[in-house]
Image (cartoon, helix red, strand yellow):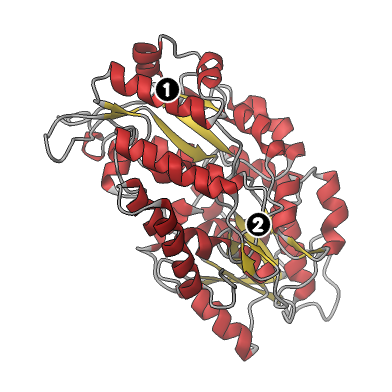
Amino acid sequence: MLKRKMAFALACLMSVGILAGCQKNSTGTTAKPGDNTPKTLKIWSFTDEVKTYALAYQKEHPEVKVEYTMIPMTNGEFQTKLKSTLQSGDVPDVVSLEISFVKEYVESSFLADISDLSPLTKDMKTYQYTLDIGSSQGKLKALSYQATPGAMFYRRSLAKKYLGTDDPVQVQAMVSDMNKFKDVAKKIKDASNGDTYMVASTGDFANLYFANRQKPWVENDKLVIDPKVNDLLDMAKDFRQNGYEAQATQWQEGWFAGMNDSLVDPATKKAKQVFSYLLPTWGLPYVLMQNGIPKDNADKTAKVGKDTTGDWACISGPMPYFWGGTYVGAIKNAKNLDTAKDFIKFMTLNETTLKNWATGVYNNAYLKAIDNTIGDTLGQGPGDFVSSQKVVDSIVSSFDNSAASKFIGGQNSYKAFQAAAPSINAKLIQASDDAIQRALNDPMANYASGKGTKEETIKAFKEAVKNALPDVKVE
């Protein structure tokens, strides 16, 4: 998930070993003679979320010694080390796989077939799109503990001021497709004299177009440009040329500033506002809620910006989409494959585990009781949207009065994501997607700014794909 990427810049390669004495085995019975040597489970990850699961697993399985290694992926370190190790043979048992590269490994021969866990996915009602991402040629290779349906978050006060209502049902009707979305952008710009943007960045709605393609990026080893790509280019240009976007770069200061009214036009120094952000499940607790208060306003003394808590609402937006996700798989040549599969089952297909994860049971105090050396930051708060519809249905009402609910004006965000998750389609996802979509970034930005024709933009895109993926035929 992208929230991890922001933290990984500060992370360093480290490993932690967790060792507990062999007293009882996982069924609660006394260990047999000869079982006094603990099994070792080696886990590699780029996110400390998996470390939380590793500690929780250790508590339930004292007969297993867990060796957890976290490697940052800010500059590709995780993939570089993993690929090198896979060639050498001294492999970990379990690996984390981010959405941008999970298919590369799922489609490879490195991961073990874990299809014997498929009956449990039916019992847990695991969201189908996550299974599609984790599968290749009929074999299940990876599972996720989370689902990441997307939504549209908008400012209630701005909706009431410029649209005449802040009611989520009415606002959703106004933005139910991208043409209506653009119409609302114009209305807001005109009514605010250009002081309020519909979005902070055209990149915010790129995922919507990518998720709703009818064709995969690559067919028969050839690049395919779906009509949605042309639609995206046209919409990006419309928003840039008409002043409907703040021209901020995602994950940078200006993008965050729109979340707390500290955005200022660099040329005129005039205050600006952003009406909406298109973000997935994790975008609420880890992006909006973290940046809804200006960084210098922790003590309520800031002169720029304001606390926007309670001034947001959540709707499904113009098109269904998803964004992000972390998967786990077992290495085929792992020394402890059975234990690796048991850990994956514990993480992704255990009802109690997923409930604990989603509702904040695995907080810092809980984890410190397992290992008091972990420090004061590791722990999972409530709100992450899990991959099991069975679990989601059982806990959705518990978020009626949560901190996230208060942030979005009393709405239950979990309920909104519950409605969105079943409609996600990920059947087109391929290993090459991330590289191809990144290749579109610069050509799209230039086209949006009026540099070059559509034909020149497509040509530049094709050249970028050739450079990134020499094995893909580009015509």
Is any part of residue 287 visible from this angle? yes
Q: Is residue 96 left or right of residue 463?
A: right
User: Could you tell me residue 396's position as x and y percent?
Assistant: 66, 29
Quadrant into which the C terminus falls: bottom right
Q: Earlier in the sequence, mark 2 or mark 1?
A: 1
Could you tell me the amino acid type at mark 1? Val
Q: Is residue 226 left or right of residue 242?
A: right
User: Could you tell me residue 397's position as x and y percent?
Assistant: 65, 24
Say which residue appears at 21% left-offset and 38% top-offset: 296
Measured Cα–Cα span from mark 2 to mark 1: 31 Å
User: Could you tell me residue 171's position as x and y percent?
Assistant: 50, 18
Farthest bottom residue? 88
- The residue where tag 2 is placed is 216
Q: Residues within 10 Å of mark 1 (few under 14, many from 20)?
A: many
Say which residue appears at 63% left-offset and 68% top-offset: 222
Could you tell me the amino acid type at mark 2? Pro
Say which residue appears at 50% left-offset and 78% top-offset: 80
Q: In the picture shown, does residue 112 fall above or below 165?
A: below
Question: Which one is nearer the viewer's eye here, 196 or 182?
Answer: 182
Label 1 near label 2: C-beta < 8 Å?
A: no
Say which residue appears at 47% left-offset and 41% top-offset: 205
- The residue where tag 1 is placed is 184
Instruction: Say the numbered circle drawn on residue 398.
Output: none
Q: Quadrant of residue 291?
A: top left
Helix, strand or loop at mark 1: helix
Is any part of residue 377 visible from this angle? no
Helix, strand or loop at mark 2: loop
Question: Which one is nearer the viewer's eye here, 173 or 369?
Answer: 173
Q: Is residue 131 left or right of residue 413?
A: right
Q: In the picture shown, does residue 49 fall above or below 187?
A: below
User: Could you tell me residue 390's position as x and y percent?
Assistant: 77, 37
